[in-house]
Image: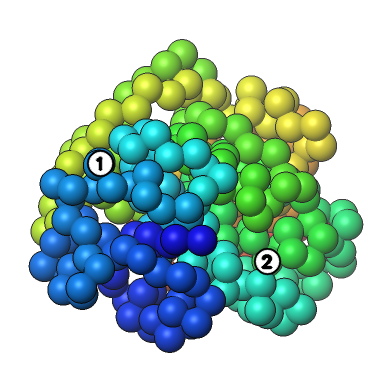
């Protein structure tokens, strides 16, 4: 099978020998054309005409944004796309590997042990899934037998989840305090910095995150979203790029029994202490602070 490697940054460089050993690579592409220095490199002006030459595209970069671009702009079937990081995982399926960006999933396992929560008792709701594997806080839980619902405004995340998270449900939406029909989501070159707020994206312009795409996506209120889950979640993982505070404050805590909450606190108007006070009043205790994420558990 003739393979096109898409992405020539660190992932490619670190795994170049493995790629060449396992694939018949006949082309290389990167959106940064200065990286295309090899003999079989393909430049953007030629990509549209040549992409159908390849039987398989191996993505060595940010899957939610790159796979979406390949499918939407070049009409490549998702079946013809592989993700390098996912392929590498097949060599260590039996190993316990932590996938959270700062090993947040390791801390979650410690907390679950403290609470006596076994994997068969865990139902997670992950808001802002992004890549369903890499830097993902629920992927290890799913590997160990837990199940849940993944939520993201990128439709591509759902396609990626079908490859590696078949036992989880995917909902394509953005989440806030209330449902509001379709809204505009600003998707930028790095999926991790995309947001409902265009000004939020502009904070990262120095990271070459230009080429913003506007995506129309439904906004679902947090309580309506929880009602959509077949099994009510007892673990909430929230990384909603600016909507986190609205979500946490809007949850009906009398109706929904959530044992563990992990939330990104970067965008709270009054900082982490306002979250601490609010959740303490709801009966939660702080378990750990890891970079931008706070992890709480329900006391008693």
Does residue 271 appear to the left or right of 113 in the view shown? left
Is residue 28 among the parts visible in the rendering?
yes
Is residue 243 among the parts visible in the rendering?
no
Q: Is residue 192 above or below residue 60?
A: above
Q: Pick out the residue farthest to the top.
A: 181
Closest to the observer: 149 or 244?
149
The C terminus appears in which quarter of the rendering? bottom right
Residue occupied by mark 2? 140
In which image quadrant can residue 127 be found? top right
Residue drawn at point x = 40 percent, y = 69 percent? 25
Mark 1 vs mark 2: which is more N-terminal? 1
Residue occupied by mark 1? 48
Closest to the observer: 116 or 34?
34
Residue drawn at point x = 47 percent, y = 21 percent? 218
- Crowd rating for badge 2 (residues with CA inside 10 Å; few <14, some 14–19, many 20+): some
| Colour pattern of the rendering | rainbow
Q: Marks 1/2: CA distance?
A: 37 Å
Q: Position of residue 1 (x, y in %)?
A: 51, 61
Question: Does the CB distance between marks 1 and 2 fall below 8 Å?
Answer: no
Q: Secondary structure at mark 2?
A: helix
Does residue 114 appear to the left or right of 186 in the view shown? right
Residue drawn at point x = 74 percent, y = 64 percent? 143
- Crowd rating for badge 1 (residues with CA inside 10 Å; few <14, some 14–19, many 20+): few
Q: Position of residue 285 (x, y in %)?
A: 64, 60
Q: Position of residue 52 (x, y in %)?
A: 37, 44
Q: Position of residue 3 (x, y in %)?
A: 43, 62
In which image quadrant can residue 195 be found? top left
């Amino acid at each position: 099978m003739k393979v096109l490697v898409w992405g020539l940054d660190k992932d490619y460089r670190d795994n170049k020998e493995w790629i060449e050993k396992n694939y018949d690579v006949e082309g290389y592409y990167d959106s940064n054309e200065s990286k295309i220095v090899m003999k079989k490199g393909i430049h953007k002006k030629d990509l549209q005409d040549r992409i159908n030459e390849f039987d398989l595209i191996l993505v060595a970069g940010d899957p939610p944004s790159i796979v979406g671009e390949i499918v939407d702009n070049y009409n490549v079937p998702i079946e013809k796309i592989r993700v390098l990081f996912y392929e590498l995982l097949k060599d260590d399926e039996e190993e316990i590997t932590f996938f959270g960006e700062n090993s947040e999933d390791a801390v979650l396992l410690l907390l679950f042990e403290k609470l006596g929560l076994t994997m068969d008792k865990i139902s997670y709701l992950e808001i802002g899934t992004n890549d369903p594997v890499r830097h993902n806080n629920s992927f290890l839980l799913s590997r160990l037998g837990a199940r849940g619902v993944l939520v993201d405004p990128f439709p591509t995340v759902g396609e990626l989840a079908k490859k590696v998270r078949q036992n989880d449900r995917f909902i394509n939406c953005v989440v806030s305090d209330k449902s509001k029909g379709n809204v505009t989501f600003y998707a930028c070159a790095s999926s991790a910095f995309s947001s409902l707020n265009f000004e939020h994206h502009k904070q990262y312009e120095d990271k070459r995150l230009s080429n913003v795409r506007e995506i129309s996506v439904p906004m679902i209120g947090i309580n309506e979203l929880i009602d959509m889950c077949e099994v009510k979640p007892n673990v909430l993982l929230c990384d909603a790029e600016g909507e986190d505070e609205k979500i946490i404050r809007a949850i009906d805590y009398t109706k929904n029994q959530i044992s563990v909450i992990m939330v990104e606190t970067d965008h709270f108007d009054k900082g982490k202490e306002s979250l601490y006070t609010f959740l303490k009043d709801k009966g939660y205790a702080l378990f750990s602070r890891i970079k931008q994420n706070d992890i709480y558990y329900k006391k008693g």
